[in-house]
Image (cartoon, rainbow, N blue to C red):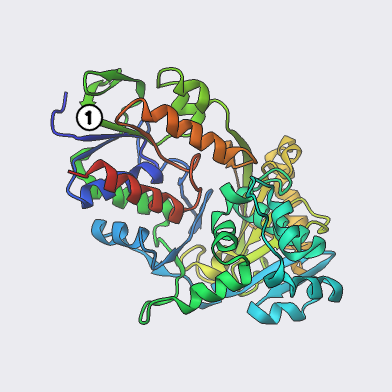
Amino acid sequence: MSESADVIVVGGGLGGLLVACEVARRGGRPLVLEAGHAAGGVAATIRDSGYLLEPAAGSFLLPHPQLTPILESAGVSVVPANAASHRRFVYDRGTLFELAGPASLATGLVSVRGKLRMLREPWVKPPTNRADESLRSFFERRFGPEMGRIGATLMAHGVFAGDPDRLSAGAAFPAFTELEDKAGSLVRGGVKRMRERPKGVPRPKVHVAPDGMAGLAAELAAHLGANFRSDWPVDQVRRDGDGWKVSSAAGEEWAPSVVIALAPAAAARLVPEPVSALLGEPSAAPVAVVGLGGTSADVPAPAGFGALTGPDSGVRVLGLLFESSYAPGRAPARHRLLKGIYGGAADPSVLALTDGQLVDLAVEEAGRILGVIPQPTWTRVVRHSQGIPQYNVGHLAWVDRLDAATAELSGLHFAGWGYRGIGVSSLAKHASQLGESLTRS
């Protein structure tokens, strides 16, 4: 049994690794216990035949006030995405629309009437009493029914593979509701934020890990050295004196504090009541990722990040990412890679298809979106049965109840994408908060 750790982190996915590295950066002594053979969790990058496919998130924005210091202190390798990464597309009503800043208003994605209603946003008064509302309700209230429906669908599909009528605006996209709270308007709040940006601080841009997110996780684990243990599946976390005992077939460890960086359903099996019952409440939605690779002639991929699909797209793919266009090293020379996202709460029934049927569907729908049917020579289907957490209406209240329950159990904390944000930046923000509280003298 180790006596050196002051914080045990259960789970070596990105959420747990970021917490541990932040604790170490602040002078603490973390110990990460990972059930699997390697670090990373769902960040299980696939390398095959010269292709690099990310089954989960594969990019992040830098610089970032919390993520940048963690990555720099750990010596993690990151590179800027290709210049084309700023180009974003939307496929709806049989047309591929490019969104490029203010020029987006000139596209036919939204009608003239819808655009005029959008321009009223700065004068739409926020509600007197803030209530948890759906993403679609929030966007329609701010921008009108047409743009609200489109915008909510794109955001829900692109981040959560979720249902805009069920996702909570405040839980899933707190930056938007915070702008309304602080400035009374998303437009006015955004303009104010731009004006307050410190001089000399570069605007965040898309970055990627050259060896994929699995490589990034491996670098974080290597930075922790002996304080990262793989093949250490935890069976139980229980109160023991003024700290916590973590048990496994591999042994036992004790520390004053423990951070469980697992999905809520997995964490529920380790902790005592009443916390375990609370952890069984959130939902997650399984997704499938389909990779299509081939020569540049056989697999068309425009210069850009990718295309999200709107509410009237007529296709089942939620997003088609142009992986090799925006990220260096994702395909062999003179080859290209596309990645389609299917399922989630938006369309769970599509996951009943076989892998072969999903590939056929992805090929057909990529052809409809791009105007040329791909002829891939390399394909891969990755299914996430654990799924993407769904921050539906009520999620914020659930987090409050979880915080109240853990307040009665000093030293017990939870981290990861099932709680306070699913992006890498959100994980880093929470890791920074935890790191500060765990190392406070």
Farthest residue in the front direction? 128
| Relative vertical location of residue 308 with respect to residue 243 in this rendering, above or below | below
For the residue labelled by badge 1, is the local secondary structure a helix, a strand or a loop? Answer: loop
Q: Looking at the picture, how far across and down is residue 337, in whole percent?
A: 59, 62
Residue of label 1 = 256
Q: Looking at the picture, how far across and down is residue 95, in whole percent?
A: 81, 69
Farthest residue in the left direction? 3
Residue at 69 percent across and 63 percent down: it is 125
Image quadrant assignment for residue 416: top left
Viewer-nearest residue: 423 or 320:
423
Residue at 51 percent across and 25 percent down: it is 278
Label 1 crowding class (10 Å Cα cut-off): few <14, some 14-19, many 20+? some
Residue at 67 percent across and 72 percent down: it is 122
Q: Is residue 296 visible?
A: no
| Relative vertical location of residue 189 with respect to residue 237 in this rendering, above or below | below
**Left or right: 32, with 60 as reference point:** left
Q: Is residue 354 visible?
A: yes
Residue at 17 percent across and 43 percent down: it is 441
**Left or right: 224, with 95 as reference point:** left
Q: Looking at the picture, how far across and down is residue 221, in whole percent?
A: 28, 46
Q: Looking at the picture, how far across and down is residue 386, in whole percent?
A: 56, 34
| Relative vertical location of residue 277 with respect to residue 406 in this rendering, above or below | above
**Left or right: 226, with 268 as reference point:** left
Viewer-nearest residue: 58 or 241:
241
| Relative vertical location of residue 94 with respect to residue 360 in this rendering, above or below | below
Amino acid type, callout 1 = Pro
Number of numbered callouts drawn: 1
Quadrant of the snapshot with the N terminus: top left
